[in-house]
Amino acid sequence: MTSHDPLKDEGKPPATVENERFFDFGPFRLDRRERLLFRDGAAVALAPKAVDLLLALTDEPGALVLKEELIAKVWPDVVVDESNLSQNIFLLRKALDDGGGRWIATVPRRGYRFVGEVKTGSAVRDSIVAPAIAPSQDSALVPGPEVPRARWLRVGVVVAVLVLVGVTLAAWLLRSRDPIPNAPNAAIRSIAVLPFQPVDDAQKDRILQLGIADSVINKLSQLSAVAVSPTHAVTPFLDGHVEALAAGRELGVDSVVEGSIQRKGPRIRCSVRLLRVSDGRALWADHYDEDAADVFVLEDHIAERVATALDIHLGPGERRGLARRYTENHEAYDLFLQGRLAWERFDSEGREASLRYYQAALQRDPRYALAWGGIAKTYSVMAIYGPLSPDEGNARAKEAAYRALAIDPQIAEAHIALAACAIFRDRNWTLAEEEIRRALEIDPACDAHTLRGYLLQARGKPEEALYEMRRERDLDPLWRIPKNDCVLALFLARRYDEAISEGSQLLALDPGDKFVRYFVGRSMLAKGVIPEGIADPSADPSYRDSQFALHELATIAWKRGDHRGALAYIARMETLRTTGRTNFTIATFYAEIGDSDNAFRALDAAARQQYPFLYQMRTDPSFDSIRSDPRYAPLLAKLNLAPTPPELGSSSPRT
């Protein structure tokens, strides 16, 4: 039961549409009976939970629906936290192309409201406008012949209303005189610096636009009092297609910095504003006119003024951080930013390109520590996903990381690279923990939370690992990699319903994501449910021949009693390129059916091939049946891991 909110009914229309089948708004039609959404007659792909949310919000257009009520309606039988709700609201808004809040309005810290003009049948209703106050239907209050007492009562009410209006107007006038309100900026605990936008499209310069934002982000990240969205979180807004406040809502921050730039001969003119996302109020604004050669000075000024506007007390170390510059060479800085942009693609071509840009930056400035850190991080990932071997990739990553730290010990990416080497190659869990701690002390918004999640999975703490993965996802809610990691973490934590729910929402946006599809399917199988719909491993030919699908198909065949067919799928998998990932996947199947000999044979092969994620055997529920086998503890010892914690033993629940 949810508590009653006395303000919940404010602005609620007198009628609901809960029992009406069709609900039209803008170009959309919602078929409530069939749970289908159409846009201009074409079906819109929506995950089941997104449909549930839309139905709940449109039951009473214009009415505030509290967060706890939405959670109770959409997840009636599952305990979920508020991040699930905000993530699904984000996905629903994305499907509705609702970046500006045209259809779904956020009521800060309380809930959401469906807004905009809606239509059911022939009735048209504007759900934003509150209805006029209707006369009471209580017969005891029907006015009779007017008496002096009633007349004085009415006069008193009118006077009280006029006084209230006068006080409110005076307060508004006084407040409006102050361009930077004295309201508590202490409420600002998170901020995103958006890429600056050109005044004239003909002057687009993506590197300059992102460069100013990146530099300000790096400086503000030195401040302990405010959480700063990392550069890769704001990169999707580089082309300026989303309004600043809408971008702030998508990123889940309290405030945003937006700016415009214009080149005038040898000078750069820049306008900057700090906006509070909750009400759109400008907390600070300024204009700059600098020599183009002094763009670093411009970035220094902006960071300092933003910190001042946020009313943050700066310690000596934080002041030095605001003044820090990693290079004075503009060309080196531009090349470094191009390397950052290439990295954002997170594929083999992007990594190769980022290396070339970082190396070119070092040719202009050999002591550019950030470029060395970028190289270290890139090599550490190449050691995991190829094309470099674990030995070669980690050796190169360590060399670049130590070069970066010799120049500047405060390079978070260098510590991240060393932590990755310790986790995926050296299995030095103590060193990994120390490097992650150092990285997060330097930059709390860096992507070290993911590495800490991996570390906790290796130590047999899946719930704590899930917490770290969700922190990473919340820091960068638009990037798909942390979302994928959360689906895996939910599976390893045996939260199968949540893994299915979150994974299905991601698949609705990207049906070709093999990684997510695999763990949605495995979660269904762990619950004793055969995957169907988009999670059906046989539905998509591009997925059907992958090792992921072959593992699922083998498991399904075995559960149905077709043992010969199941082993045929595994034999087919063994004809694929025998990587550590392939052998690990084969091992999960044999462990699931109780064939411990073949399970350990495949695990030993994965260990010889230095499979980076072999530590997942520690928490993967497929290996419950072999944890008591005498061969299991020695295999963990090869990974420098202690025996399995009791809570993850063979008695662990599977549903």
Image (tube, rainbow, N blue to C red):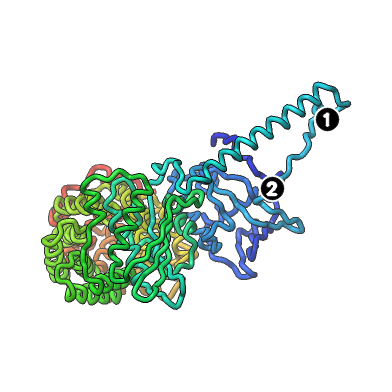
The residue pinned by badge 1 equals 142
Location of residue 366 by image quarter = bottom left
The secondary element bearing badge 1 is classed as loop
Percent position of residue 284, x then y:
42, 52
Q: Residue at x 55, y 57 (%)?
A: 101
The secondary element bearing badge 2 is classed as loop
In this orientation, which residue lies closer to the viewer: 398 or 297?
297
Tag of residue 16: 2
Q: Amino acid at mark 2?
A: Thr
How many circles with numbers are drawn on the protein? 2
Q: Is residue 558 visible?
A: no
In this orientation, which residue lies closer to the viewer: 523 or 21?
21
- Outermost residue toward the right in this view: 145
Percent position of residue 404, x then y:
15, 63
Give the left or right position of residue 5, taking residue 622 as reference.
Answer: right
- As measured in the structure, the alpha-carbon distance from the residue carrying label 2 to the one carrying label 1 is 27 Å
Q: Residue at x 46, y 67 (%)?
A: 240
Q: Amino acid at mark 1?
A: Val
Q: Residue at x 85, y 23 (%)?
A: 147
Give the left or right position of residue 12, taking residue 631 as reference.
Answer: right
Location of the N terminus by quadrant is top right
In this orientation, which residue lies closer to the viewer: 169 or 50?
169
Percent position of residue 267, x then y:
35, 71
Q: Is residue 105 visible?
A: yes
In this orientation, which residue lies closer to the viewer: 629 or 212?
212
- In the displayed structure, would residue 631 be above or below residue 403? above
Percent position of residue 312, x then y:
33, 45
How many neighbours does mark 2 have within 10 angstroms: few (below 14), some (14-19), or many (20 or more)? some
> Would you say the residues marked 2 and 1 are in contact, meaning their CB atoms lie under 8 Å apart?
no
Which badge, 2 or 1, comes first in the chain's sequence? 2
